[in-house]
Amino acid sequence: MASAKQLVAVAVVAFLLAAASGRRQPVHLRLYMHDVMRGPGTTAIHLIHGVGPPHDIERGGYFGDTAAIDDVVTEEPDVGSPAVGRAQGTYMLASQHEEVLVVAVTVALTAGPYNGSTFSVAGRVGVYDDKAEAAVVGGTGRLRRAAGYLTWRMVKLVVSEGYVMVELDVHMSVPVSAAAAAGGNWPVICCDRVLGRLAQRKKYARGNW
Ligand SMILES: *[C@@H]1O[C@H](CO)[C@@H](O)[C@H](O)[C@H]1NC(C)=O
């Protein structure tokens, strides 16, 4: 038979795990995506040519035009700086009258504390809008159950080279428990803290909380 003390200890562990799982850790990333639409280093291709009437504003464009992207992602606003991931997905010209894209992009990080993790972006962005926002709708690995938003801003356009650089200022949060499950640096800090609290369970069992 479990003693009353053991039962209280089990309850304390359950309480602390529940408390830990409810907390969220903020994650802020500023990243640059590089669309290269021509030449040997092409990362963005015109996948679907819209069959509707010519677009009102976008010269040579058609409603429904869709590009597939496999863009290099960097932390510096420089296409030659070290890659920290790839942005993979689609852009669709989703308005007949405005230069508006609907994007579905997953960013796979390949360096830094979130190496091996991904986050997914969905939303509607004005191509020339300085304050366009899209949603962070989820993630994997250390970014599992990520939620938040990002600002999407075209910071460079070189028409002659078919080159566009987009700045993503990503504000999201992840549950502490999800991040801890994947291991890594700051989750260890989190777990040390939780374990430290567990180590005090005798004090708690005496009725101090
Ligand atoms: C990212 O993780 C992979 C797989 O664990 C590893 O091979 C690679 O060296 C890491 N890259 C960096 C830059 O840490």
Image (cartoon, grey):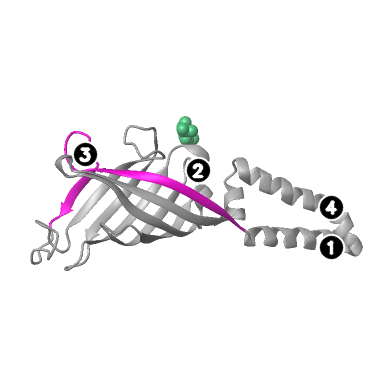
Question: Does 187 appear in magenta?
Answer: no
Question: For residue 52, what is the image quadrant?
Answer: bottom left
Q: What element does badge 1 sit on?
A: helix
Which residue is the site of mark 2? 114
Which residue is denoted by mark 4 in the rendering?
Answer: 200
> Can residue 89 be seen in this snapshot?
yes
Q: Position of residue 158 (x, y in %)?
A: 20, 42
Residue 73 on image: x %, y %: 36, 41
Q: Which residue is mark 3?
A: 42
Q: Of marks 3 and 4, which one's residue comes earlier in the chain? A: 3
Q: Which amino acid type is marked by label 3? A: Thr
- Sequence-wise, the earlier of marks 2 and 1 is 1
Q: Secondary structure at mark 4?
A: loop
At x 38% / y 50%, what residue is drawn? 168
Please name which of the two marks, 1 or 4, marks the residue nearer to the observer.
4
- The amino acid at mark 2 is Tyr
